[in-house]
Image (cartoon, rainbow, N blue to C red):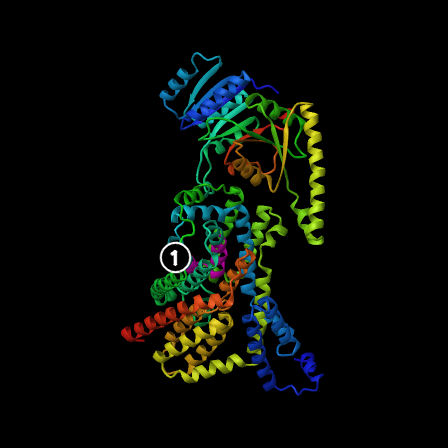
Amino acid sequence: MTFQKIIFIQMEKFNEKNFNISQCIAGKLEAELLIFLYKLSGDVLTFIEEKLKGTNIKYRIKSFDDLKSLKATINKENPDLVILTEEKINPLKHIFTHTNAEKLLKTIEKYNVIFLQEDEDNIQKALIYVNKEVSEFYIKTAYEFVKKIIGEVTFVYSFYEDFYELTIRKTHTEEEAEEIIEAMIEEKEKEIVRKIENAVQNQPYHLITILGEPKKEINLFAIERGFNFIIVNSKVKDKTAFIENLQVSLGIFLDNKEEE
Amino acid sequence: MGEHQSLLAVFGINVTHQLLYWLSILLFVGTYTMIILEKYFHRVAAALFGGTLAIFLGLITPKEAWEAIDHNTIFLLIGMMVIVSVLIESGFFSILSAQALRITKGEPLKILLTFTFLTAFLSAFLDNVTTVLFMVPILISLTTKLKLKPVPYIIATVLASNIGGTATLIGDPPNIIIGSLGHFTFNDFIINLAPIVIVTHVVGTIVFTLFMKIKGDLTPKITDPKELEKIITDHPVEYDIVLMRKGLIVFGATVLLFFLHHTLHLEAGTIALFMASVLLLWSKENPEKVFERVEWTTLTFFLGLFIVIGALESTGVFETVAHYVADVIKDPMSGILILGSLSAIISGIVDNIPFTMAMSYVLIDLGKEATFNTEPLWWALALGACLGGNLTIIGASANVVAAGLSEREGYPIKFWDFVKAGTPVTVITVIVALGLLWLKYAIFGI
C-alpha cells in the first residue's frame, strides 16, 4: 500500500520532537501531512506553520476543542497513517489511567497507527513482529515503510508455545525437552521465512527469533538491543497490552487489504 | 479407630489409650527433631512422614487426619498464591522493586526499615502469608541487584509480619480464632493490642537492626556511586499493564471481602480460592503456568504438620497441657505472664493455629468457673501466640511460606539461622508486649 495521507494528532500538549519525526516520515513517504491539534493554543499553530513553510511537504493544520469533532474529522479524512504521541507515565499510575492516545484507540484502529514515545526524536532501528498468522499484505506494508524510513529491515518472531513446552518438560528429560523444543522452533522459523520471502520477494532482511510471550518479550528485547520502534499487525493477540506495555514507539499496521 | 488399632495389634501390641498418648508425643518429638535436623532430612519429607506414620500407627484415623487439616489455611494459601503468581507474571513486583530501589537509593538500612515498616503495616490488615507472598519476591529481586544477602532481609520481613499481624483481628490466624471463640470485635483488638504492637514493632526493629549491623548485613556491597546509580536507574522492567490491572482489581476485591468475611459468613480461605478462580478465568492465563508458582511443597508440609498435631489433639495431649496451665493460673495478673510466655514458647515450636485453638477452649472453660475476669488472658494468648511465631522457622505459617519462596529462588533459610535471628527478637518483643499488657491492667485495673 502507499501512504498518501498522514494525520499527526497532538492532544493538549505539543511535542516538538514527535512533530519532527512526523515531518520526516511525511517527507520520506512524499505524503500529505495533516496536523490535528486538540485543545492547543494558537502559538503552536504558528510555530508549526513556521516550521513547515518552505518545505516540500504538502500540509494542512486544523484545531479542535471538541473530541467528537476531532474523531469525526479523522474518519472523514480517511488517512493512510495516524501518528500520535504516547505519554510516558509511571507503570503503577498507568494501571489506573489511560493516556490520551489510548482514549482515541477505538476511532483510529481501522487505520495504520504509530504511537511515538514522547521523548523520541528519531526512529533509528525498527523491529517488525511476525508470526504464522500475519498476512503477506501486512509484511509487505511494514517492510516498505521501514525500508523507506530507516533502510535496514529486521523481522522478529517470538516462540511462545507454553502449553507444549510445559508438557514436554514434564514428560521428557531436560536434554530431550531442549532438543524437541529446538526442533519446534526451527520448524516455526521455516514457516515464517517462507511467508516473508513470499511477501518481500528477494529483497534483503534479517530475522531474529526470541523466546517468550510476545506482548512482553518483544518490548524488552527492543529496549535491550537498542531498537526504538516496533511494528505489529492490527490483528495481533493482546493488542491493548502491546500498547499499554509500550516502552518504545509502536506501529500497528493493518493486516489485510479489506481493512483499508 | 477400627482397622488402625489392628495394625499395631498385628505385632501383638496391646493398644491402650495410654500407649497412643505417649506414641503421639514420641511421634511429635521425632518429627520435629527430623525437621530441625535439616542437614539429613528435608522438612517437607519429615512432616509428611510424621503425618502419615500417625495414621499408620492408628494414633489418628484417616477421617480424623482429614479433619485435622485446617482447610481454611490451605485454601487461603492456594488462593493467595495463585493471585500473587498472576501478579508476578504481570511484572508488578519488578516495578515495585524498581520503585523501592529508587526511593531507598539502594541503602541497606533504608531498605530494611522501609520493608519492615511496610510489612508490619500491611500484615495488620492482610493475612501474614499474603503479605510475605507479596514482599519476599520484591526483596529477593532488590537485594540481589545490590549484591546483598537476601536471607537476613527476608527474616526481618517475616518477623515484622508476625509482629504487625498481632495488632488486629484479621492480621494473624490465631487472632481470627481468638476473635471468633472469645467473641471479640475488630475494635476490641485495635484498642487492646494495636498500641502495644506499635511499641513492640519499634523495639523489634531496633533489635533486628542491631543484629544485622553486628553481622555486617547492613554494609553496602556496591560502593561505587556510578555503579549504584546505574543499578537504580538503568534496568528495563518487563511488565504487562493489562494483566496487572486485572490482578490488582481481583486482589483489592479479595482484601475487601476479607474485611467483610464475618458479615458474609464466609471463611477467608473460601474467599481467596474463589477470587483466584475468578482471576484465572478473567486473565485467561494458562493455569499450568500459574500453578507452577504455587508452593506445593509448603502446602504438603502443612498437611503433614496438621496431622501430627491432630494426633496430639486426638490422643488428648493438648487437653492435658492446657488443663495443667489452667491449674497454674490463679489470678489474671500472673496469668498474663504465665500464659503469654508459655504461648510464645509453644507457638515457636509448633504452628500457632492448633495451639491457639486448644488454649481458646481452655479459656472458655476457665471463664465459666473462674472468679476473675479472664479477658486479659485472651490478650496474653494473642500476644504470645502471634509473637512467639517468630522463634523458629516453623512457628508461623508466614515463616514456612517465606522459607519455601526463598529456597525456590536459591536462598534457603537454615533452621538455626532463623532461630539465631528470631530468638532475640522474640524474647525482647514478648517481654515488652506482655509487660505493657500487665502494666495496662495494673494501672487501669481489670
- State the residue at coordinates (46%, 13%): A55
Quarter of the image where the C terminus of chain B is located: bottom left
User: Percent position (x, y) of residue B389?
Assistant: 46, 68
The residue stretch that appears in magenta: B122-137
User: Percent position (x, y) of residue B250?
Assistant: 51, 50
Vertical arrangement, residue A167 with respect to residue A184, above or below: below
- Indicate whether residue B130 is drawn in magenta: yes
- The tally of labels here is 1
Identify which residue, A252 or B235, lies in the foreground: B235
User: Percent position (x, y) of residue B355?
Assistant: 49, 74
Q: Is residue A224 visible?
A: yes
State the residue position of label 1.
B117
Amino acid residing under circle 1: Phe
- State the residue at coordinates (43%, 80%): B366
Identify which residue, A208 or A4, lies in the foreground: A208
Judged from this view, the residue extending furthest toward the left is B443
Vertical arrangement, residue B288 with respect to residue B14, above or below: above
User: Percent position (x, y) of residue A210?
Assistant: 62, 39
Identify which residue, B291 or A79, lies in the foreground: B291
Name the quadrant containing residue B327: bottom left
